[in-house]
Amino acid sequence: MAAVNQDNSLVVAGATAPSNSKQSQPRPKTLDSQSVLKRLQSELMALMMSGDSGISAFPEEDNIFCWKGTIIGSKETVFEGTEYRLSLTFPNDYPFKPPKVKFETVLFHPNVDLVGNICLDILQDKWSSAYDVRTILLSIQSLLGEPNISSPLNAQAAQLWSNQEEYRKMVEKLYKVPKPL
């Protein structure tokens, strides 16, 4: 199996390099974190330039591996206009492993548990290194209005979802979300 790194160098799984070849030697860890750093900086710039409404994310203070994000609930959903805060923590082997993403804002939703964990396939077994922060935020924003009720983290929310009027009442009761005008 072969893959191309961000710097366009080819990596072949299981291949061993001749001992006299400097280019083929394993890279030190500092270079790996440098490529992750470059990837995250590139994703930050792309996200800022994207112009997507209702999503944003920025590194937290001086740590590029920890971001704070926001998502605005999509129109014509019970979450319309409400701002939700998230945390994104990137592993050292990003983008080959997904970031840990959690809601910091309490949310009554079929695919979000009481502590903010999110059940979304692209953050777990369907992760691809082709995904980026923008894709993650847009997917979560979409998930708000279109939950996967067959794989709930919050069974009560999943059960209520089919009755949007009752679901809205529960959300308003629990979180006092103002109704859109």
Image (tube, rainbow, N blue to C red):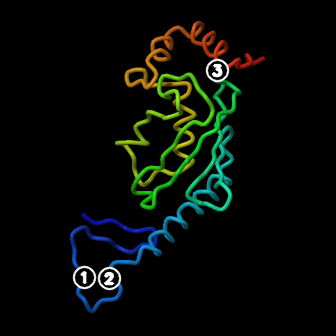
Q: Residue at x 61, y 51 (%)?
A: 67
Q: Residue 148 in the image: x percent, y percent?
A: 43, 25
Q: Residue at x 58, y 54 (%)?
A: 66
State the SS at label 1: loop
Q: Hey, what amino acid is under mark 3?
A: Glu
- Ranked by sequence position, the earlier of labels 3 and 1 is 1
Residue under pointer 2: 25
Q: Is residue 24 above or below residue 98?
A: below
Q: Is residue 151 left or right of residue 135?
A: left
Circle 1 crowding by C-alpha within 10 Å: few under 14, some 14–19, many from 20: few
Q: Is residue 36 above or below residue 59?
A: below
Picture disc at residue 17: 1
Q: Is residue 142 above or below residue 88?
A: above
Q: Is residue 92 left or right of residue 12?
A: right
Q: Quadrant of the C terminus?
A: top right
* Quadrant in the picture for residue 37: bottom right
Q: Are marks 3 and 2 in contact (CB under 8 Å)?
A: no
Tell me the CA gap for discs 1 and 2.
6 Å
Q: Residue 30 in the image: x percent, y percent?
A: 47, 75
